[in-house]
């Protein structure tokens, strides 16, 4: 993946998180996929589960798809999801 595509996907991740209610520009403007991985999250979807109390299945699905495009494996996704929630609707995503 080239840097331009990675930048576009990071911008999309920020947009999805803002639409989900996280003030990504104000509170998390410096966060990108690499930072999320570096601090122990498996991707944007896992970060979302860790920061939100009310989880929207559609938002989570979009973030899982985005993470997959950025290189997060299905195994990492499942581990991160189970670590943060036992909600079967989310785990099935």
Image: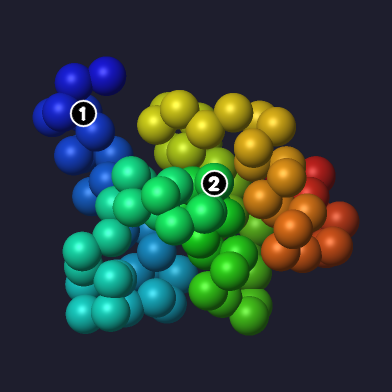
Q: Position of residue 85 (x, y in %)?
A: 77, 64
Q: Quadrant of the C terminus?
A: top right
Q: Position of residue 18 (x, y in %)?
A: 34, 69
Q: Is 72 positioned to the left or the right of 12 in the image?
A: right
SS class of the residue under badge 1? helix
Tag 2: Cα neighbours inside 10 Å, few (<14), some, or many (≥20)?
many
Q: CA distance from mark 2 to mark 1?
A: 19 Å
The image quarter containing residue 75 is top right
Q: Is 12 positioned to the left or the right of 76 in the image?
A: left
| Residue 5 - label | 1
Q: Is residue 24 above or below residue 89?
A: below
Q: Residue furthest top?
A: 1
Residue in the picture at 51% in, 60% down: 47
The answer to whether the residues at label 2 and label 1 have Cβ atoms under 8 Å apart is no
Q: Is residue 76 above or below residue 59?
A: above
Residue in the picture at 13% in, 29% down: 4
Residue in the picture at 60% in, 65% down: 49
Does residue 68 appear in this view?
Answer: yes
SS class of the residue under badge 2? loop
Tag 1: Cα neighbours inside 10 Å, few (<14), some, or many (≥20)?
few
Q: Is residue 56 above or below residue 58?
A: below
Marks 2 and 1: which is nearer the front? 2
Q: Position of residue 88 (x, y in %)?
A: 86, 56
Residue at image mark 2: 42
Q: Position of residue 36 (x, y in %)?
A: 41, 54
Residue in the picture at 71% in, 64% down: 84
| Residue 76 - label | none
Q: Is 51 positioned to the left or the right of 3 in the image?
A: right
Of residue 78 and residue 92, the one placed in the foreground of this image is 78
Does residue 13 appear in this view?
Answer: no
The image quarter containing residue 60 is bottom right
Q: Quadrant of the N terminus?
A: top left
């Amino acid at each position: 993946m080239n840097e331009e595509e990675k930048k576009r996907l990071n911008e999309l991740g920020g947009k999805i998180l803002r639409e989900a209610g996280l003030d990504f520009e104000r509170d998390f403007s410096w966060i990108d996929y690499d930072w999320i991985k570096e601090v122990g999250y498996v991707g944007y979807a896992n970060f979302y589960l860790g920061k939100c109390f009310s989880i929207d299945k559609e938002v989570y699905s979009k973030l899982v798809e985005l993470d997959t495009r950025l290189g997060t494996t299905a195994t990492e996704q499942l581990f991160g999801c189970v670590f943060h929630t036992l909600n079967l609707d989310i785990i099935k995503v």
